[in-house]
Image (cartoon, rainbow, N blue to C red):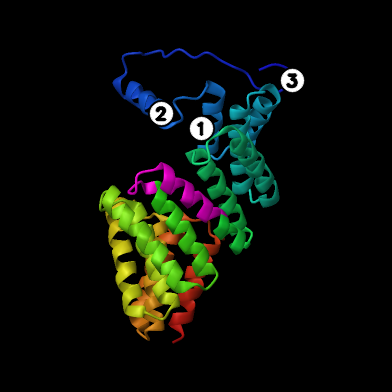
Amino acid sequence: MGGNNRLYEVNLTLTADNDPELSKLTDYIRQERFSDEEGWYRLGSVLIDMGQFEKAEDIYQVLLDQRKDEKDMALIYHRLGYIKDVQGKYEEALTFYEESLAIRQKTLPSNHPDLAKSYNNIGLVHDSMGNYPKALSSYEKALEIKQQSLPPTQPSLAMSYSNIGLVHKNMGNYPEALSSHEKALEIQQQSLPSSHPDLAKSYGNIGNVHYNMGNYPKALSSHDKALEIRQQSLPPNHPDLASSYNNIGAVYENMGNYSEARTFYERAVQIGEQSLPSNHPELQKCRNNLERVKNK
């Protein structure tokens, strides 16, 4: 790719073109990972998926230096923003996302889905920084664009409603949060298989809002549904299962049913210890919950 960037372009040839499993895998990767992109962009995406963020950043920085096309630059800025967001460098992430948005606002129709992606990711960064009003404004702009450009049952709309619901919950606007999460769930029920993990997330979000409102029977019902879906669709030691068990334990604890709470907290800790680092904050939260209920 030129210069001393220590990035090399290598042409690879399969040693066994007749391997059906390898062929199936490569076809899937081509379809799944941005099949309309050039190889270097695709490699950057794969590196992001692998958690190799610094290597992905190196590639995108080189591409940024070489590209003059605004469409390409908007995509590169967007990917760099994502990398910085995942790394917790929120101010840098915001700068890159806003660069990408500015280009897209100049070059795309006002209802283009890529604008919704920019607003959504800017909202995510503000959300992570605790800037909830700004996050809500960005999420609502993303939703407005999606409503103009996508079918009403598109799962991406559900994602926007979920994000809006989470911000309302963080702001203490529980009725608004509940309404948004219920809209997300309604769309998912129309567009996704009944055992899809995204439905479990929506049931969990609804359960959390009911919990914060003190509606413990409704919270328990929603968390039970989330757990049931996750048991069907996820490996038995998946962290999301630990989250469901922990949520159910918290409801039982607040209902005064400490023996049931302890059972669910123990299961949450057991799964967390199998799937998370020993110092992970979520695992520590589960352990603290278990210790607290043991003393009741």
Left or right: 148 as drawn, with respect to 227:
right
- Is 295 placed left or right of 74 in the picture? left
Q: Which numbered disc flags the more N-terminal residue, 1 or 2? A: 2
For mark 1, does the 10 Å Cα neighbourhood hold few (<14), some (14 to 19), or many (20 or more) residues?
some
Over which residues does the magenta segment extend?
A: 138-155
Rendering coords of residue 62 (x, y %): 68, 26
- In the rendering, at what x and y percent does residue 94 appear? 66, 48
**Total labels drawn:** 3
- Which badge, 3 or 2, is on the more N-terminal residue? 3
Q: Amino acid at mark 3?
A: Asn
Nearest the viewer among 41 and 152 is: 152
Distance between the Cα atoms at labels 1 and 2? 9 Å
Q: Tell me which amino acid carries mark 1.
A: Val
Which sits earlier in the primary sequence, circle 1 or circle 3?
3
The residue identified by callout 2 is 29
- Relative to 205, say whether 146 is above or below: above
